Amino acid sequence: MGRKGLFDLEKHFALYGAYHSNRVNVLIHTVFVWPIFFTSLVLFYFTPSICQLFNLQPQCYLARHGLFLNLGFFFALLYAVFYVRMDRKAGSLAAVLCMACWVGSSWLARDLAQLFCWAGQFLGHGVFEKKAPALLENLIQTFLMAPFFVVFEVLQTVFGYEPYPGFHASVTKRIEAQIADWKEKKEKLEPYP
């Protein structure tokens, strides 16, 4: 069975699914979430590294190759460890992607990627989902979980992956309940004709 609390994969995935039920919006997220993660690491590339803080620059092997143990590294490592803790199999793949993003972002910075990917996210929600993004309601869940759930969703869609039997059915029920609740609240707020 699944974990509870912070590592309750089923709960987190149901919340994510409730905000991502439109196929076009899901595709947009699948394409743009990891580039957002990648370009976020680019922003952290310019933070001081441990080698700089402790004056180990000449001895720091990674720094000679353009890789710095800076906030970008620790950010990627934190995500990687969190994902593996959530689910060992899907989390391990997500962890490898996190660290690959750190390496790639250390070697390449594209200024317009953040703007382009964020525009895609808001377009997907506004035009296709017709619902505000989850980041307006749950900022931590949005930034922490989105990259992992894109990996998880692709594994589930393409390979039928489930961390345990019944996971998908349980999450689907939670998603449907959250969407119904959201629609009910929306109807109450709309003026009658």
Image (tube, rainbow, N blue to C red):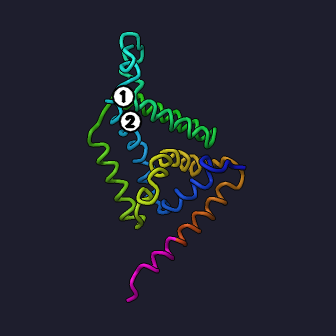
- Image coordinates of residue 150 in percent, x first then y, are 50, 48
- Image quarter where the C terminus lies is bottom left
Question: What range is drawn magenta here?
Answer: 182-193
- Image coordinates of residue 77 in percent, x first then y, are 50, 32
Please report contact status of discs 2 and 1: CB closer than 8 Å, yes or no. Answer: yes
Q: Quadrant of residue 192?
A: bottom left
Could you tell which of marks 2 and 1 lies nearer the N-terminus? Answer: 2
**Prevalent SS, magenta region:** helix
> Is residue 104 positioned above or below 37 on the image?
above
**Element type at mark 1:** helix
Determine which residue is flagged by label 1. 106
- Give 48 or 23, whichever is nearer the viewer: 48
Count of numbered circles on the image: 2
| 189 part of magenta stretch | yes
**Element type at mark 2:** helix
What residue lies at 35% left-to-right and 21% top-to-bottom? 66
For this orientation, the residue located farthest to the left is 112
What residue lies at 31% left-to-right and 42% top-to-bottom? 113
**Dot 1: within a 10 Å radius of its alpha carbon, few (fewer than 14), some, or many (20 or more) residues?**
many
- Give 45 or 95, whichever is nearer the viewer: 45
Identified by mark 2, the residue type is: Leu
Q: Is residue 160 left or right of residue 30?
A: right
- Regarding residue 189, the answer to whether it shows in the image is yes
> Is residue 142 positioned above or below 58 on the image?
below
- Image coordinates of residue 137 in percent, x first then y, are 45, 60
Identified by mark 1, the residue type is: Ser
Q: Is residue 2 left or right of residue 126?
A: right
- Image coordinates of residue 50 in percent, x first then y, are 41, 22
- Regarding residue 24, the answer to whether it shows in the image is no
What residue lies at 66% left-to-right and 60% top-to-bottom? 169
Determine which residue is flagged by label 2. 41
